[in-house]
Image: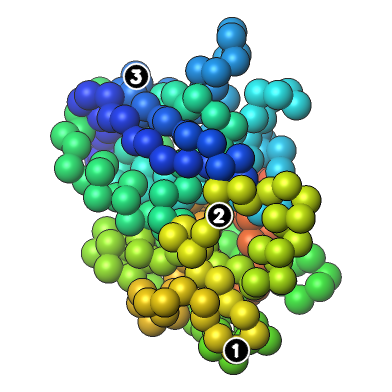
């Protein structure tokens, strides 16, 4: 049997919010057994912590955003959630002074580096696993889909296809382990096309966005002077997003995930379908 873990001590992580461009300071604190991962805004008086659950997701357009009211929202939780998952952090309270989790370099690398050096505390409750019992599928009718199949561990098979020749068709197909995550997934940054950047800027978003926290593609070229960090950086980043989003199930999901061009929206939809009937899964 595996046990739940939390941090031994609070950890502070500072950065900027991708959209606001404002300082985003976050303190991750230990939490009791069965608390799960919760986020609380410290810049709004009296707001309750929001549990990082698929049912509290209110926006999936550019990131995964949790909320309980129009003002009590916390966005871009997916990268830090993937790091909580891979390090086996079951319980934590994340305090944040901003609507956004710091973007850092757009990858999971900094979160992983900081949290890997922290001592964890073993707790007195068993870790919560969820075993998928049959195929759970969501497809959007526009060519993107995600399926969860029964398996004994988390395995992700992901395909993307982009018009830009520098990306083109990329595939990831592996069991998710700390080794694979650290070397192939954590370094992978968010990516976008230059025309999207221009549009988002024009509507007042991504004020904190730069080549320091995203891969920006312009047609068949990459604008970042250092190029890609790892082979297949784009699809591997999608794998990181998927790991973080699936952790909003509140469980360590045992499934083979087969994803095709999917994103935060599809990840949320497949979880809603998974939890729509208790015949779809078994809690271990
Ligand atoms: Zn991402």
User: Which label's residue is closer to the chain start, 3 or 2?
Assistant: 3
Q: Position of residue 53 (x, y in %)?
A: 58, 36
Q: Between 138 and 208, which is closer to the camera in this rendering? A: 208
Between disc 3 and disc 2, the foreground one is: 2
Instruction: Farthest residue to the top: give it.
Output: 46
Callout in the foreground (3, 1): 1
User: In this rendering, is residue 72 above or below 222?
Assistant: above
Q: Is mark 3 within 8 Å of ligand 1?
A: no
Q: Judging from the image, what secondary structure is the residue with disc 1 in?
A: loop
Residue at screen point 66% across, 53% down: 62
Residue 110's tag is none
Residue closest to the eye, 68 or 158: 68
Q: Secondary structure at mark 3?
A: loop
Any atom of ligand 1 within 8 Å of the CB at mark 2? no
Q: CA distance from mark 3 to mark 2?
A: 35 Å
Indicate left or right for 7 with 63 as reference: left
Query: What residue is rendered at 48% in x and 34% in y?
Result: 23
Tell me the tag on residue 32. 3
Residue drawn at the location 51% of the way across and 18% of the way down: 42
For label 3, the crowd category at 10 Å Cα-Cα, with few meaning under 14, some 14 to 19 and many 20 or more, is some
Residue 38 locus on image (x, y percent): 48, 27
The answer to whether mark 2 and mark 1 are in CB contact below 8 A is no
Asked if residue 163 lies left or right of residue 84, the reply is: right
Q: Name the residue that disc number 2 marks.
A: 209
Residue that label 1 marks:
220
Label 2 to label 1, Cα distance in Å?
21 Å
Q: Residue at x 50, y 69 (%)?
A: 215
> Is 279 located above or below residue 211 in the figure?
above
- The C terminus, quarter of image: top left
The answer to which of marks 2 and 1 sits earlier in the sequence is 2
Residue 125 is situated, as x and y percent measured from the top left of the image, at 30, 26
């Amino acid at each position: 049997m595996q046990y739940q873990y939390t941090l031994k001590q609070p950890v502070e992580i500072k950065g900027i919010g991708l959209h606001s461009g404002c300082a985003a300071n976050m303190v991750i604190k230990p939490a009791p057994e069965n608390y799960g991962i919760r986020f609380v805004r410290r810049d709004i008086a009296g707001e309750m912590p929001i549990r990082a659950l698929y049912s509290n997701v209110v926006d999936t357009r550019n990131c995964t955003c949790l909320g309980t009211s129009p003002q009590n929202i916390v966005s871009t939780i997916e990268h830090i959630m993937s790091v909580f998952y891979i390090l086996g952090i079951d319980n934590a309270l994340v305090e944040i002074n901003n609507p956004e989790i710091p973007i850092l370099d757009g990858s999971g690398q900094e979160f992983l580096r900081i949290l890997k050096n922290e001592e964890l505390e073993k707790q007195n409750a068993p870790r919560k696993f969820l075993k998928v019992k049959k195929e759970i599928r969501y497809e959007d009718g526009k060519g993107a889909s995600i399926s969860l199949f029964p398996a004994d561990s988390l395995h992700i098979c992901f395909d993307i296809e982009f018009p830009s020749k520098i990306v083109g068709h990329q595939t990831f197909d592996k069991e998710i382990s700390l080794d694979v995550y650290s070397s192939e997934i954590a370094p992978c940054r968010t990516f976008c096309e230059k025309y999207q950047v221009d549009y988002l800027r024009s509507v007042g978003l991504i004020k904190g966005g730069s080549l320091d926290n995203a891969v920006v593609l312009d047609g068949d070229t990459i604008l970042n002077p250092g190029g890609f960090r790892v082979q297949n950086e784009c699809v591997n980043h999608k794998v990181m997003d998927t790991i973080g989003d699936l952790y909003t199930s509140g469980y360590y999901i045992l499934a083979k995930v087969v994803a095709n061009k999917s994103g935060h929206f599809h990840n949320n939809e497949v979880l809603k379908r998974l939890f729509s009937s208790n015949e779809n899964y078994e809690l271990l």
